[in-house]
Amino acid sequence: MDNFIEFKNVTFKYGENDNEKTVIDSFNLAIKKGSFTVILGHNGSGKSTIAKLMNGLYKPNNGEVIVDGISTADSDKEIEIKRKVGMVFQNPDNQLLASIVEDDVAFGPENLGCPPDESKKRVVQSLKAVNMSEFINHSPHHLSGGQKQRVAIAGVLAMKSECIVFDEPTSMLDPQGRGEIISTIERLNREDGITVVLITHFMEEAANADRVIVIDDGKIVADDIPKNVFKNAPFLKRIGLDVPKTTDLVLRLKEKGVNLDLNVISVEEAAESIYKAFHSEGI
């Protein structure tokens, strides 16, 4: 699997002179094409800065960010980079500009110079991909939070983005809305092969990722499959993070002497592990 995004010794700073603050320094990272990567970190850890560097919204002070072989520093390729790497942010209202869903999703391709027929085709395909076809003629502002976010995702898909970076896309949603968005993200990665980078502080959203990267003070402090990362609960809690509720439950029962498999994340895995443990003890 080829690398789609690469950070090569990247340094990024906010402010100037006495107010200058280094957010990440000599940072290296490679995101594989077609992968599903989750980036975790407490507020101020640098994770959202990393997200914005991925499609050229921010430019490094030093080092280089490469997107599908193109440097984000190449001003002649800026539009191409933003097409290749779409962004979905926390508040969908900030990405919804038109009064009709169809026009909103068409905004991106039309600005890329797509002919009307091609633009219409992309709108229909993108709304279908996020299960929002029936809302094509609705006003975005009358939709639920989860529905608005799915329209925002459709707008990125309509630009034929090969990678989508989600910067805490569920933080303003209720549990149902969060579930809708995570299911959509997982399906786009699994069925359509879209490279996904998900920035989140909801641990459960990382359960089905290929890889979990934990950021602390602008540095990678953990990088592994979800089960291996979440097994180290004391470390995560020391840097201001938590673990999925299922993992926390299993760890607490383990501390009480229940013989449980720690390699569990999902509710189903936890239930099966607990059942087996108590069943083997005749309880």
Image (spheres, helix red, strand yellow):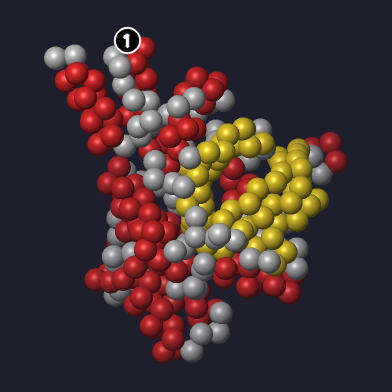
Tell me if residue 231 comes above or below residue 53 in the rendering: above
Q: Is residue 185 left or right of residue 53?
A: left
Question: How many badges with numbers are in the image?
Answer: 1
Give the image location of residue 240, x and y in percent.
Answer: 53, 26
Q: Residue at x 37, y 63 (%)?
A: 191
Mark 1 burial class by Cα count in 10 Å: few <14, some 14-19, many 20+: few
Give the image location of residue 51, x and y in percent.
Answer: 59, 51
Q: Residue at x 38, y 30 (%)?
A: 263
26 and 30: which is toward the camera? 30
Tell me if residue 120 comes above or below residue 200 in the rendering: below
Tell me if residue 158 comes above or below residue 53 in the rendering: below
Which residue ends up furthest to the top in the rendered image?
256
Q: In this view, does 97 lie to the left or right of 16?
A: left
Q: Residue at x 50, y 73 (%)?
A: 159
Image quarter (top left, top right, bottom left or bottom right) of the N terminus: bottom right
Q: Which residue is drawn at 33% across and 64% down?
A: 130
10 and 42: which is toward the camera? 10
Q: Name the residue under label 1.
A: 256
Image quarter (top left, top right, bottom left or bottom right) of the C terminus: top left
Tell me if residue 108 comes above or below residue 264 in the rendering: below
Give the image location of residue 31, x and y in percent.
Answer: 59, 53
Identify residue type, mark 1.
Answer: Lys
Residue 18 visible in image: yes
